[in-house]
Image (cartoon, grey):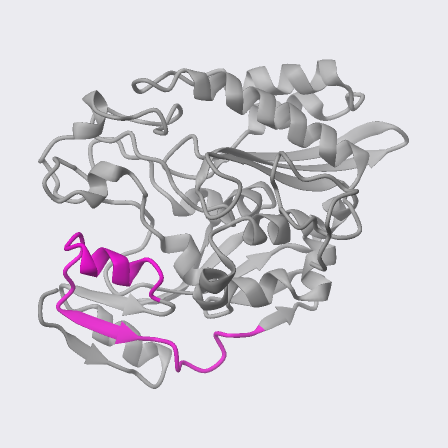
Amino acid sequence: MNTFDYVRPTDIAEAVAAATEPGAAYLAGGTNLLDLMKGGITRPNRLVDVTRLKGLDRIEPLADGGIRIGALVRNADLAHDDDFAKSYPAVAEALLSGASAQLRNAATVGGNLLQRTRCGYFYDTASACNKREPGAGCDARDGENRLHAVLGWSRACIATHPSDFCVPLAALDAVVEIAGKTGRREVALEDFYRLPGDRPERESALDPGDLVIAVRLPAEARGFAPHARYLKVRERTSYAFAVVSAAACLRIEQGTIAEARLALGGVAAKPWRARAAEKILAGASPDSAAFRRAAEAALADAKPSGDNAFKIELARRILVRALTLATAGTPPRIAALPASAFSTASGALQDA
């Protein structure tokens, strides 16, 4: 690693001022950043340690019925918060399906939003990667790319976003709170991430020095709790990123889908909100025919970016299955293998 300065600010304003300097990076749990530094992928000349900032480690119910999650809340703490798990079960299921227990104990909510792609060519400094080095090219295009994007990709980049947590957040209209040089602002999580276009190094709406301080979920998101699931297909059952994943949240009234919220993971450079599929399901009976129509609409614009055409049909099937599980109802407890296709309600269980 290169030599770097270490700064530990005492408040948000001081942190933003310190991180505005070129080459600075925020340090929280460090579960992704330190790996990037060790591999020479990221070489910050200043680390701004935000772990001691007050007020960013709280889970706060809001007066309007929503919830505000501080950026320093640990993934495990959020997933195991009783009220949160009951109110937003798909989000808790997604959190518990990511990484290992040890990493979930260290990783933060803000860091989860900002984790970098797990594209092998991004991590290999001997390979060409426009995301790591703008203008270098994209070796993934003609390389090992079976796990790469099928939606929203460009000739400059075919990488995917790795987060599980962000998929149900996108479905439930989460909002990201940001502190920056010009003050505080809010961005819908769906708009927080950028598609690669010809500038894949620009991954989010953040400007230099911007600090994610919280994520909010609106009150209406609680209305999906009785029928909300997250399903993830991975190459091994634990400690692996999604090949494809889906969040399905339904509001069912008198046997009819009154409203649907859907998002896909592992298919694009951002969590992919399936709004066309949501419209198809509104007012429909919750049956396999409607689910298949919705899945076709969700993947209507998908195209292979290499040797990954199978992901398109896989994504359709996972969305259908997630919808089927959501229709059956949110289980009272999260299974021991959260979000796994091999998990059953009658299997080994653990509290959420």
Residue drawn at the location 71% of the way across and 57% of the way down = 350
346 or 174: nearer the eye? 346
The magenta region covers 30-58
- Relative to the observer, which residue lies in front, 131 or 35? 35
Q: Residue at x 63, y 20 (%)?
A: 294
Residue drawn at (46%, 48%) of the image: 239
Q: What's the residue at 49%, 61% (across, down)?
A: 104
In the image, 296: left or right of 229? left
**55 in the magenta segment:** yes
Q: Position of residue 108 (x, y in %)?
A: 45, 64
Give the dominant element type of the magenta stretch: helix, strand or loop.
loop
Image quarter hosting the C terminus: bottom right
From this view, report whether residue 236 is shown above or below residue 150. below
Determine if the magenta segment contains residue 44: yes
Occupied quadrant, residue 290 = top right
Q: Is residue 164 left or right of residue 134?
A: right
Picture coordinates of residue 146 (x, y %)? 34, 24
- Residue 214 in sight in this render: no
User: Where does the image place residue 90, in percent across and percent down from the top left?
Assistant: 65, 47
Position of residue 62 in the picture relative to residue 103 (left or right): right
Q: Identify the image quadrant of residue 7.
A: bottom left
Above/below status of 94 relative to 234: below
